[in-house]
Image (spheres, rainbow, N blue to C red):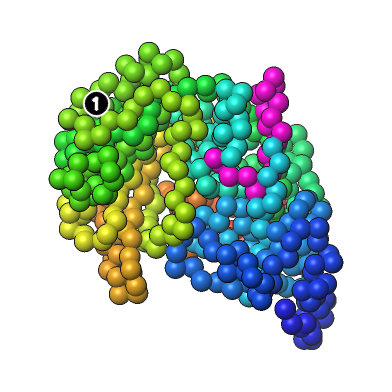
């Protein structure tokens, strides 16, 4: 990395250090552009993201993070934060800046008696879940084991326990955070409560979370897994109705999509529309079997893998070198009746994208019982989360997929105009304000002014400091 001389407008900034100087500064590993592992280190989950940071620092501890934050502040280098590398918008990488990679910070301390855990933010959801399961305990994260808990938690966390135990942030007791001035703070209900409010849904705008303290719940066995049903409008609408009527112990994710050529699906079903559904009942096995029975009777199942399983088995196995290129749109809707279900079928049948999906997550339960202003996640009363997506291959196909997803979203739009930040791409301030509507945005901007007045943490779904400098 070349040494840069400051211009007159940068007189208060230091020279950018050489790679040799960087390696002397940090306890962790510094990966430079000419290192053999550079290309692998800059590869993220989603394909089509080809950014070349000047250096990647795999930090070893909070001290490394503090030093790197100060370096970025003093040099003006763009700073990207990477936990698991699943940012839809590609925020895990900087082009020409520096990446703070948390991959080596994976310490986990579980207090089974108190049902709490301190977890460093380089851990994945799968690693944490497997370790907690050894004590018959769990914290709800998302639905994919390889996702890093850092970004997932800061954005909210909607997964298989959302109706029973709420969002991930509803089980966050405290966090240790390096702020823009390089200080390591603990934020909880008593210490820096404004910061604690903001990081529960406000993303990485306020600092680098080094570790989280979570509440754990007794979750030994769940009744669930995969259920594949034919996707007719009647079955789709009935599935959502059953999910809404189910007890809070049951959370569902229904992916309406063409059946992939998986070995456990009959060949004659490949390419036909199905509901590829994941269900998890966190409670007594006999009650779980009763709760799942209505879903099995909606239609003759194409595949039925529902059974009592350990909670970590809900996460599908990782697929090595899987880097999909996709266009997506996240939104909330109020209902899925026959008309809405017909719209879903019509749009999926009209596209020839190799993979296309309408994902429906019924919300409510524990998540909805928390006041909307208790955290920066403001969509407590939203009923159904929808993710629309289409894979693409090349720029021309990308434009086709973009148009299809946009039209599909317009056709699906109802009264709820909200969005969930963790599933958003780089979509501009108008969409971002839908994730943080009204006073939520204003409050976040005011807290940003207090903790990051120069907007150092801007390579994210960015909430700039309040323009008038007000702090409330």
**Secondary structure of residue under mark 1:** helix
In the displayed structure, 164 sits above or below 316; it is: above
Name the foreground residue: 461 vs 433: 461
In the displayed structure, 402 sits above or below 365; it is: below
Q: Residue at x 52, y 55 (%)?
A: 86
In the displayed structure, 315 sits above or below 260; it is: above
Quadrant in which the N terminus appears: bottom right
Q: Residue at x 59, y 40 (%)?
A: 127
Location of residue 459 by image quarter: bottom right
Q: Residue at x 74, y 82 (%)?
A: 2
Q: Residue at x 29, y 56 (%)?
A: 355
Q: Which residue occupies the extreme top position in the image?
A: 286
Location of residue 110 by image quarter: top right
Residue 159 visible in the shown view: yes
The range drawn in magenta is 109-126
Name the foreground residue: 359 vs 320: 320
Where residue 288 appears, as percent x and y from the top left, is 37, 19
Residue 61 magenta = no
Name the foreground residue: 91 vs 227: 227
Residue 120 magenta = yes
Where residue 47 appears, as percent x and y from the top left, is 45, 64
Q: Which residue is mark 1?
A: 296
207 lies left or right of 129:
right
395 lies left or right of 451:
left
């Amino acid at each position: 990395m070349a040494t840069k001389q400051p211009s007159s407008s940068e007189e208060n900034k230091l020279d950018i250090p050489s790679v040799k100087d960087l390696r002397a500064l940090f306890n962790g590993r510094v990966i430079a552009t000419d290192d053999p592992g550079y290309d692998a280190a800059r590869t993220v989950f989603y394909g089509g993201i080809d950014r070349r940071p000047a250096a990647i620092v795999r930090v070893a501890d909070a001290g490394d993070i503090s030093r790197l934050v100060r370096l970025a502040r003093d040099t003006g280098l763009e700073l990207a934060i990477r936990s698991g590398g699943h940012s839809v918008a590609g925020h895990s990488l900087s082009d020409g800046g520096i990446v703070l990679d948390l991959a080596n910070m994976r310490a986990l301390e579980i207090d089974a008696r108190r049902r709490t855990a301190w977890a460093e933010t380089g851990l994945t959801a799968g690693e944490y879940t497997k370790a907690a399961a050894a004590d018959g305990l769990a914290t709800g994260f998302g639905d994919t084991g390889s996702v890093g808990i850092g970004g997932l938690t800061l954005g909210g966390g909607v997964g298989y326990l959302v109706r029973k135990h709420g969002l991930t942030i509803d089980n966050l007791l405290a966090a240790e955070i390096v702020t823009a001035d390089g200080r390591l703070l603990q934020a909880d209900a008593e210490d820096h409560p404004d910061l604690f409010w903001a990081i529960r849904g406000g993303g990485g705008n306020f600092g680098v979370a080094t570790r989280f303290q979570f509440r754990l719940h007794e979750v030994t066995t769940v009744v669930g897994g995969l259920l594949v049903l034919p996707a007719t409008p009647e079955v789709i609408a009935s599935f959502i109705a059953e999910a809404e009527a189910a007890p809070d112990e049951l959370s569902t994710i229904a992916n309406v999509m063409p059946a992939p050529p998986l070995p456990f699906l009959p060949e004659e079903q490949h390419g036909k529309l199905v509901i590829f559904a994941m269900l998890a009942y966190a409670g007594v096995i006999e009650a779980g079997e009763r709760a799942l029975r209505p879903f099995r009777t909606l239609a003759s199942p194409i595949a039925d893998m529902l059974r009592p399983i350990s909670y970590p088995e809900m996460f599908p196995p990782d697929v090595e070198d899987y880097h999909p290129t996709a266009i997506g749109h996240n939104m909330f809707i109020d209902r899925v009746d026959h008309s809405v279900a017909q719209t879903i079928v019509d749009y999926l049948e009209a596209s020839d994208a190799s993979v296309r999906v309408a994902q429906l997550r019924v919300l409510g339960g524990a998540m909805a019982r928390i006041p909307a202003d208790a955290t920066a996640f403001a969509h407590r009363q939203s009923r159904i989360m929808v993710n629309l997506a289409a894979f693409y291959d090349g720029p021309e196909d990308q434009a086709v997929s973009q148009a299809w997803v946009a039209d599909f979203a317009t056709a699906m739009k109802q009264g709820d105009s909200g969005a969930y930040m963790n599933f958003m791409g780089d979509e501009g301030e108008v969409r971002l304000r839908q994730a943080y509507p009204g006073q939520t945005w204003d409050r976040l901007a005011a807290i940003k002014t207090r903790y990051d007045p120069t907007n150092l943490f801007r390579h994210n779904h960015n909430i700039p400091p309040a323009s008038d400098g007000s702090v409330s």
